[in-house]
Image: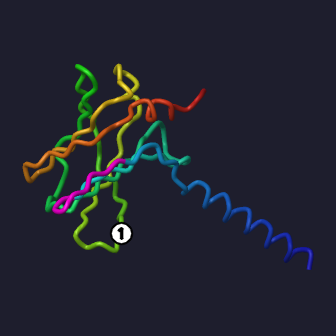
């Protein structure tokens, strides 16, 4: 009986720790919607992610295959983000929405003088560019303390 209780406790503890490592910490979320178009991004981290990686999910109802360029415009500074597509599959109940999950390094933002009131621009392979507000201070304050 005591062994069974101990096993149940250990399995519960393991499941709790595994679930906590998969939960995300949202940094910023912005969207634009009108009668014809919708686009948004969700910027977040996973506690278990390696290094200083930031995750970004871009969503739009536009037809595209990939993001060609992501850059941030802050005052007179333009920061081109070096990103890679994540293998994560994002599901939605809206079949018109297309998702593009990417990851980039936090150090790409820390090395620049990033204004809190910036804009992030997504240039797609279909020639369309989307611009949304980007609070650089939120991203910079996620830097891990050593």
Q: Position of residue 21 (x, y in %)?
A: 58, 54
Looking at the picture, does residue 96 appear above or below residue 56? below
- At horizontal 40% and vertical 29% (from top left) the residue drawn is 107
User: Residue at the left extreme?
Assistant: 127
Q: Position of residue 63 (x, y in %)?
A: 14, 62
In the picture of the structure, the residue carrying the numbered disc 1 is 91
Looking at the picture, does residue 2 appear above or below residue 123? below
Q: Position of residue 140 (x, y in %)?
A: 45, 30
User: Residue at the front extreme?
Assistant: 35
Which region shows up in magenta? 30-37
Q: 73 or 105: nearer the eye?
A: 73
Inspect the magenta stretch and tell me whether residue 16 lies in it: no
Q: Is residue 127 left or right of residue 28?
A: left
Q: Is residue 136 left or right of residue 81?
A: right
Q: Is residue 54 left or right of residue 47?
A: left
User: Residue at the bottom extreme?
Assistant: 1
Check disc 1 and report its element: helix, strand or loop.
loop
- At horizontal 21% and vertical 58% (from top left) the residue drawn is 34
């Amino acid at each position: 009986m005591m062994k069974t209780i101990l096993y149940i406790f250990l399995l519960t503890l393991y499941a709790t720790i595994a679930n906590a490592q998969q939960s995300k910490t949202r940094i910023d979320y912005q969207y634009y919607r009108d009668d014809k178009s919708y686009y948004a991004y969700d910027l977040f981290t996973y506690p278990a992610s390696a290094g200083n990686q930031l995750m970004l999910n871009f969503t739009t109802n536009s037809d595209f295959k990939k993001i060609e360029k992501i850059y941030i415009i802050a005052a007179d500074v333009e920061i081109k983000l070096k990103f890679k597509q994540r293998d994560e599959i994002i599901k939605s109940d809206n079949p018109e929405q297309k998702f593009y999950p990417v990851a980039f390094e936090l150090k790409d933002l820390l090395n620049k003088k990033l204004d809190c009131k910036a804009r992030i621009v997504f240039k797609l392979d279909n020639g369309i560019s989307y611009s949304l507000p980007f609070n650089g201070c939120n991203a910079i304050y996620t830097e891990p303390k050593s």
